[in-house]
Amino acid sequence: MSEIDPLKPELLRPRCDPSRFSFTTTDEIDGIEEIFGQERALDAIEFGIGIQQKGFNLFLMGPAGLGKKTLVRRLLERRARSEPTPHEWCYVHNFAQPHKPLALRFPCGTGRRFERDMEQLIDDLQAAIPAALEIEEHRSRVQEIEEAAKERHDAAFEQLDKKAQSEGLRLIRTPAGFAIAPVREGEVIDSKEFDNLSEEEKKRITTAISKLQQDLRKIMEEIPELQKEIRDQLRELNREAARFVIERNIAKLREAYSGLPRVLKYLQEIERDAVEHAGEFGETEAVPMFPGMPQAPSRSFRRYMVNLIVDNFGCSGAPVVYEDRPTFSNLFGRAEHEARMGTLATDFTLIKPGSMHRANGGYLVVDAVRLLREPHAWEGLKRALMSENIRIESLGEALGLISTVSIEPEPIPLNVRVVLIGDRELYYLLHEFDHDFSELFKVAADFEDDMDRDEENTLRYVRLMASLTRQANHRPLDAAAVALAVEHAARLADDSEKLSTHMRPVADLLQEADYWARKQGAEIVSREHIQTAIDKQIHRADRIRARLQERIRRGTVLIDTEGAVVGQVNGLSVLILGNFSFGQPSRITATSRLGKGEVIDIEREAKLGGAIHSKGVLILSSFLAARFAKDRPLSLAASLVFEQSYGGVDGDSASVAELCALLSALSEVPIRQSLAVTGSVNQHGYVQPIGGANQKIEGFFDVCNNRGLTGEQGVIIPASNIKHLMLRQDICDAAEAGRFRVYAVSTVDEAISLLTGMPAGERDESGNYPAGTVNQRVEARLQELSDLRKEYSRDEKADKKE
């Protein structure tokens, strides 16, 4: 039998001794708020938010549950408090180009005041301008203009009438207008009297009337010009009256905003436009459609309103904005539309800001996956960062999907530090396939998945659990519960020398343990409650594992745990379903025969084997040739297969098991079915570490336990995986009682010795293996196959000669 002893129980699950803690419950210790174990990521984040150069945006990478958002939120908010509050922005009407609203910048708190001042200006002008047009002096001047125009009008007709009288004619007013008619003794003659006149008199009168009608026509043609002149005079008079009121009101605003040149220029445009349209201020406001609705400003005055899109009033420091739904419009804003005369239209008052506007001058945090899922959001973000401005545009219009009256707001200068949060695979994909990415996101903060399980980190972990418990208002944990939670963190890390930095599963465990403590009426969370929470989490997720175990128990899936069989070994694999993983034993068989040195991977031939698994088979083939056929052809044909495997197989963790099955088939030495083996092998026969060691051991243990432990069952793992062991307590108890064993090996020879109970054998000084060893039997069989191949070759040559 092998001289390799099973691992001691204390190596299967390195304990966290509760006696090392100086507290009874976590209420007695101080919590910890800072994130620890992420020094590299912390240094990168502090550098990224400290440097002010263009392109040094951050990408926080690592799987979910590491506390990336919590850490960056804490650091950003701390940094933002010490930074100046950024400017405010508003959109106003562009009097020169109405479809291109102007963006005005204001110091913090000034934008809201300017918005109120403009509303007050409109109210004041609506009251003051009509009042100025109603004062006695203004009305007298209006009357003078109107009377002067009337006098000019009357004088022209009076002069024409005098000229007509000199010709024996009169200018008379009729319902149809003015007419010229002959008169006698002051009375207009009728047609009969006119017919009785002499032809010479008729001709004179007709000629005179014709000349006077030309003069009348000329006077009538001058009337529109006279009316226009009067209107111009009245308009100018109204402007003069309104200008004084407007200048007086706007002068106050000029004084209040004297330090803002663009605002002063805008006020100048408002003054010019208000004077030009002074008459509109006397119009009646629109009545609300429904009672109780606020009265909307007249459309005539909307152009004087202010649309404050970034309001930092009451804020202290730079903004930190978290965009949970980074659509194109949520990031860069939009111009909404309203129905007008049966069509959709918009103006600057309908502009809505995006998170880029709110974060301008500060920090924007976005989930990278969500960003990339939104159409054109990623391209829009890159364009904004490269151009350093925020441009509001309709995505539908840009793509030609809709056709409505739209606007082109003036872009706003952008100064923001963007923080993307995603996993490592996404970071490297973007870095590889998007050339702009490396120019815009130059700082990568890579979060650790685990940290060393030393004394300092363990105590910090305990303090963190105390903080999580208090923040959630849960019951305190006793020392034994804390110790089990620490062990569980090591198991989550798949390493007894590490602690997982995934805090979400730990926080969820503490919450569930508190639930079970409350259900039992306990005031303190004990080790029993932590264990119950762990067991319940597994129970909720292990339906498929239970069904697979049931198939093995009922013999549907063939797995032997007793006896010995040639060319057959129990391999181990891990299945991952969501956030739950478990081990599953598989029967691996090998056959051998005379051939040309081929080891056939049936999984690969059936297109069920992955590239890594195929690589493992090629490596074990190379090992066989290098060890047993250095000086002669490898006259072997072998086949390897995972029995009852109906899905894909990948990974090289079964290469030790496959090699041992092949050695058994060649040596015809049976393999003990009470053992299962996992590990990969290199070309020199050394066993290499694999992943999922805990789950694989537990998977085979459950099969053996369901059938009854005999004390002969166990699992063989690579020696380099010892430090990863954090097995379930029931396995540790079985190992302590000698009912289940875990072996660690460093070479294939050690593994085959354990599996067969026969020494593997080492070459002596003459290069031969000792008789009765596995290697000697393999070499003898391969020599036999080689001799057979030579004999067949001679026979074939002889047949050809004949």
Image (cartoon, rainbow, N blue to C red):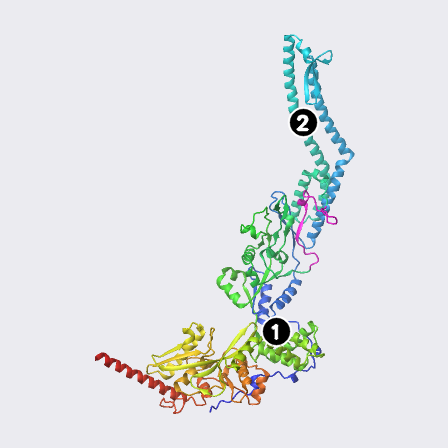
Q: Nearer the viewer, mark 1 or mark 2?
A: 1
Q: Position of residue 571 (x, y in %)?
A: 48, 81
Q: Position of residue 306 (x, y in %)?
A: 67, 48
Relative to the observer, which residue lies in front, 195 or 350? 195
From what the image shows, is residue 790 above or below residue 235?
below
The kind of secondary structure element at disc 2 is helix
Q: Is residue 238 visible?
A: yes
- Circle 1 packing at 10 Å, graded few (<14), some (14-19), many (20+), is some
Q: Is residue 476 visible?
A: no
The answer to whether marks 1 and 2 mark residues whose Cβ atoms lie closer than 8 Å is: no
Q: Position of residue 73 (x, y in %)?
A: 63, 66
The circle on residue 226 is 2
The residue that appears at 66% across and 23% down in the rendered structure is 220
Which amino acid does the dot numbered 2 rest on? Leu
Which amino acid does the dot numbered 1 rest on? Pro
**Stretch in magenta:** 288-315
Q: Which residue is mark 1?
A: 505
From what the image shows, is residue 334 above or below residue 689?
above
From what the image shows, is residue 355 above or below residue 514?
above
